[in-house]
Every structure is written in structure tokens, then in C-alpha cells.
Image: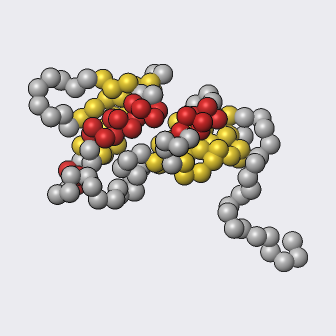
Amino acid sequence: MARFARVVPRLPVADLGRSRGFYVEHLGFRACEPEPGGDPDFLVLVRDGVELQLERDEARSGPGGGDEPPVPGSTLSFEVDDAGALHRRFAGRVAVEWGPEVYGYGRRELAIRDPDGHLLILSEPTDEPPTCGGREGAEEPDGA
């Protein structure tokens, strides 16, 4: 039987250069150079054995050249070895959607969005006690 070896996400982006800059500058990925000649529509990024592909999406680019607010996109969850260090790296440079928080399932997580609205969850295992409850705003029913 055929086996699956890995999955490599391919994200649609409005502006390949802008997205390349984000992943290289803020997340430390290295961009593999596209084939010479012309304006590339596709880019491969790598870091620590993790590969991510970006593809120009004309529907996202539109007549404004990607100036419109991003359409919410995919969610990617990356296992990292130091979510706290990444959080410190983002300080004042990248808006953090939430976290870092320790969840009851034994993970410390934080999340950011890339320029196209893709949610990037950065998660590490931990034995620390949870720092947040379940759902925000959920209350116990009377008499519980």
C-alpha cells in the first residue's frame, strides 16, 4: 500500500514579495530562489526541515494589487520548541492574535496572522499548569 510521507501546505497570497518578506523576516524561513527570468507565481520557503509553499492568487491580488483587506485564509499549526522566544521576537513587530497561553491539553500556544489573513498557531508541549480557562465568556450554569 502507498504511504504518505509528509504534507506541504500551499497558501494562496496576494503579493508574493510581501508574503516572502513576512515569513523570512518574522519567522526565520529561507526562500528558495525561483527559476530565473520573469515574475514568479510560486515560492518555496524552508526552515528546520519544514517546507511551506506560497502561490500568487489572482483573486486575492485583484485590481488594487493586494491593497484590500485580506480574505481570511487557512490555519496552520507549527510545533516549535520555544513559543516564548517567538513571542518575544514578535514584540512590537507582529500583532499577536492570542497567547502565549498554556491550555489544558498540555500545549503552550500563540497565534499570529500573515499578511493574507492565514492564522499561524505556534505550539509547544509543556507540563506547566493551564493559564487560561476553556471558552472565553463561558459561565457555569446556576446550581452547578
Total count of labels: 0
Q: Where residue 94 sits in the image (x, y, percent)? A: 49, 44
Classify residue 41 as left or right of residue 92. Answer: left
Which residue is the extreme one toward the right? 143
Q: Is residue 55 visible?
A: no
- Residue 89 found in image quarter: top right
The colour scheme of the drawn protein is: secondary structure
Q: Where residue 56 sits in the image (x, y, percent)? A: 24, 43
Which residue is the extreme one toward the front? 92
Q: Is residue 40 visible?
A: yes
The quadrant the C terminus occupies is bottom right
Residue visible at 56% across and 41% down in the picture: 91
Residue visible at 33% across and 40% down in the picture: 19
Look at the picture and state if 95 lies above or below 2. Answer: below
The quadrant the N terminus occupies is top left
Look at the picture and state if 48 lies above or below 79. Answer: above
Q: Where residue 14 sits in the image (x, y, percent)? A: 27, 48
Classify residue 73 as left or right of residue 13. Answer: right
Residue visible at 77% across and 35% down in the picture: 127
Residue visible at 24% across and 35% down in the picture: 42
Look at the picture and state if 100 lies above or below 38. Answer: below
Q: Please name whichever residue, 92 or 49, is drawn nearer the observer in this view of the structure.
A: 92
Q: Where residue 113 sits in the image (x, y, percent)? A: 46, 48
